[in-house]
Amino acid sequence: MRFWIINFAVTMLSFAIAGVSGIFLVPFLHKLKFGQPIKVKDGPKWHAKKQGTPTMGGFMFIISTVITAILGYWLYRWSTNPDVTSKATLNSFYRLLSVIVFAALFGLIGFIDDFIKVVRKNNDGLSAMQKIALQLVFSVGFLFALNKFGDTSTRLDFGFFRTPELHIFYYIILIPVIIYLTNAVNLTDGIDGLCGSVTFVAMLIFTVCCSILGSNEMTYFTMALAGGCLGFLIWNFNPAKCFMGDTGSMFLGASVTGVGLVLHKHLLLILVALVYILEALSVVIQVSYFKYTKKKYGEGRRIFKMTPIHHHFEMSGFSEYKIVITFSAAGIISGVLGIITLLAF
């Protein structure tokens, strides 16, 4: 009972910090003229009216998550009086800290990207290669930390099937997976309230899974981020008063990926992150098909009206509210399937 009381308190405090911080952050971003540049080719033409909406609002949930996750963890440890010097207790804290640092470093990549965009007053920030190079370095560091703090298994766990120990190949496989998933979350941030809502759902699902697996320390992070996302959505629901920017979406991407890898349940990660995965996959399919048809027929053809796929639904007449509800519902369904597979296998 104490465990869930602290978790609830963490969620509410994170929600309050994120929501209240917007009162100060949004006017401050306006004052600095840190508005989001909009390229019509990156979304439906009516998104042009969102030009200048303050960006980097992800700081709301980044600050609230970091503060309340660590506070919640230490409150729980203090209330249960464990031996904080034991290796198991220290490793659990270091794994939590590794996810927080990993997410913060990816948030830093996003911040640099956002800062360059607002300074240049266009939508060109870091180059793709610069982003990937930084993501590669931080991903390697994160996997090294997990190995050092107790996760020495190199088996891929798909529930009904587990690979043998893959040794170094495990990490070679996971690095592109991390980069794909974190950028997939970034791509999901394309309409008001979408990325925050889908991530709120993902963190609730992960909280249940962490509890089932006995990874209690991670629930303070997942619930802190859930509360932070909810507080941010006050400012981000349509019509958005503030965007999370790459600062926020890269933090969320690393958070989702980091929690999934700490749990070492790879099928679960796929199911919880399925909405993001399909968002990025729609871009891959569209670009590949366009290039193929251009080479074969002399002109590129498209499967979707626009990608990522949330723009396809938008171009098909779905309101932003309806897309957010639909995608969040899809996240709930795939997440519940993840919980079922966790219990079944």
Image (cartoon, rainbow, N blue to C red):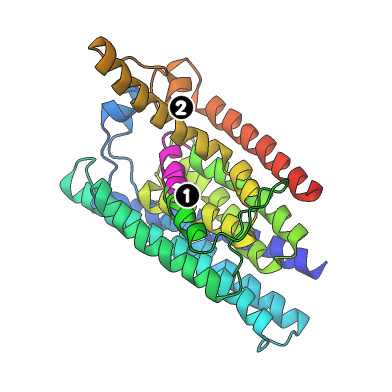
Q: Position of residue 283 (x, y in %)?
A: 40, 30
Numbered label attached to residue 88: none
When the figure is inspected, residue 330 is found, relative to residue 102, above or below; the finding is: above
Write down the residue under mark 2: 309
Label 1 sits on a secondary structure element that is helix
**Which range is magenta?**
180-192
56 in the magenta segment: no
Compared across the picture, whether 215 is left or right of 232 comes to right
Between 99 and 20, the one lying in front of the other is 99
Q: Earlier in the sequence, mark 1 or mark 2?
A: 1
Q: Disc 1 versus disc 2: distance between alpha carbons? A: 20 Å
When the figure is inspected, residue 127 is found, relative to residue 80, above or below; the finding is: above
Residue at 25%, 50% (x, y): give it: 129
Residue at 25%, 53% (x, y): give it: 130
Amino acid beneath label 2: Ile
Q: Position of residue 340 (x, y in %)?
A: 77, 43
**Numbered disc in front, either 1 or 2:** 1
Query: Which of the 4 image quarters holds residue 69?
Result: bottom right
Residue at 47%, 66% (x, y): give it: 142
Residue reaching furthest right?
1
Q: Position of residue 308 (x, y in %)?
A: 42, 30
Numbered label attached to residue 177: 1
188 in the magenta segment: yes
Residue 55 shows in the view: yes
Amino acid beneath label 1: Val
Compared across the picture, whether 336 is left or right of 113 comes to right
Magenta span main SS: helix
Compared across the picture, whether 338 is left or right of 235 comes to right
When the figure is inspected, residue 280 is found, relative to residue 131, above or below; the finding is: above
